[in-house]
Image (cartoon, rainbow, N blue to C red):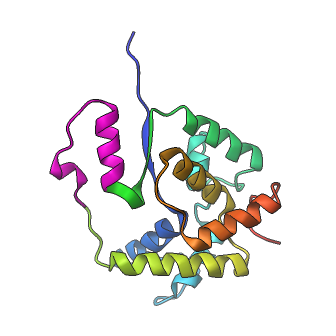
Amino acid sequence: MTRFHYMTMLRDPFRRLVSAFYHSKRRKVECPTLARGASLLDFARCRNETGPRGCATKMLVGRACEAAPYPSAAEVEQAKARLAEFSFVGLSDDWTASVCRAHSLFGRPTYEAATGNVRPGQYDHSAQAGEASKLAADSLSGGFYDWADARLFAFAVERFGGSPLPPALAHGLALAKMDPGRTGSRA
C-alpha cells in the first residue's frame, strides 16, 4: 500500500497580507471598495471585510478561502488536528531551514536550487517584516486581527520548533488565550 506524505509551508498571516498588498498593487487589482494608492492598513481593512481572512484555517477544514463565515473556534482546532497529521510542516518565513528539514526527513539531499527564492517580489523583504509587525499592532487596536490563522500559524511554529513569533503576533496570541472563544474580529 502506498503511503502518502502531506507537507505544507505556512506563512505569518501578517506577512502574507503585506505580500498580497504589494501583489495587488503590481497587478493593479485592489479591493473593489478602495481607491488607488490606498495604504496597507486600508487594504487590510478591505481584506477583512471582503477577502479571505482565516484562509489557511478554512483550507485545512475543506472550505474555500473566500467562503463565509469566518472560521469558528472548533474549526481552528480541527485545522490544528489535521495539521498535526502532516508528515512535515514548514515555515515560509524560515524557508531554507524548512527545506533542509524536509529533505532530511525524507532522506534526500538538499540542493542549493531548492532553497532559493524563485519568485522574488519587487519590494524590500527586510522592510516587509517591519510592515507586518506594524500591521499586526494596528490590527489589534483596529479590531480586525486574524485570530484563526494566527492560532494556526503559532501551532505550526511550535511544531516546527523554530523561529520565535514576531512580538505583535505573540501579543495577539496572548490576548487570544485570555479569551479562548474569540476567533473573529473584535467587537
Q: How many marks?
A: 0
Q: Relative to 134, is 186 on the left or the right?
A: right
- Residue lying at 34% horizontally and 40% vertically, measured from the top left: 102
The one of 146 and 113 positioned closer to us in this rendering? 113
In this view, 183 is above or below 28:
above
Q: Can residue 107 be seen in this view?
A: yes
Quarter of the rendering containing residue 74: top right
Q: Relative to 63, is 184 on the left or the right?
A: right
The one of 121 and 169 positioned closer to us in this rendering? 169
Q: Can residue 32 be seen in this view?
A: no
In this view, 3 is above or below 21:
above
In this view, 113 is above or below 167:
above
Stretch of the chain drawn in magenta: 96-118
Quarter of the rendering containing residue 49: bottom right
- Residue lying at 24% horizontally and 53% vertically, measured from the top left: 115
Task: Where is residue 38? Give x, y as percent.
Answer: 51, 88
Task: Where is residue 143? Give x, y as percent.
Answer: 73, 75
Can you name the residue that lies furthest to the left here? Answer: 112
Query: Which part of the image, by quadrant, shows the C terminus?
Result: bottom right
Quarter of the rendering containing residue 126: bottom left
Residue 167: within the magenta?
no
Task: Where is residue 105? Give x, y as percent.
Answer: 34, 33
Query: Which part of the image, by quadrant, shows the N terminus?
Result: top left
Residue 103: within the magenta?
yes
- Residue lying at 63% horizontally and 42% vertically, measured from the top left: 79
In this view, 116 is above or below 121:
above
Q: Main secondary structure of the magenta part?
A: helix
Task: Where is residue 78? Give x, y as percent.
Answer: 67, 39
- Residue lying at 53% horizontally and 44% vertically, measured from the top left: 159
The one of 24 and 127 positioned closer to us in this rendering? 127
Q: Relative to 24, is 47 on the left or the right?
A: right
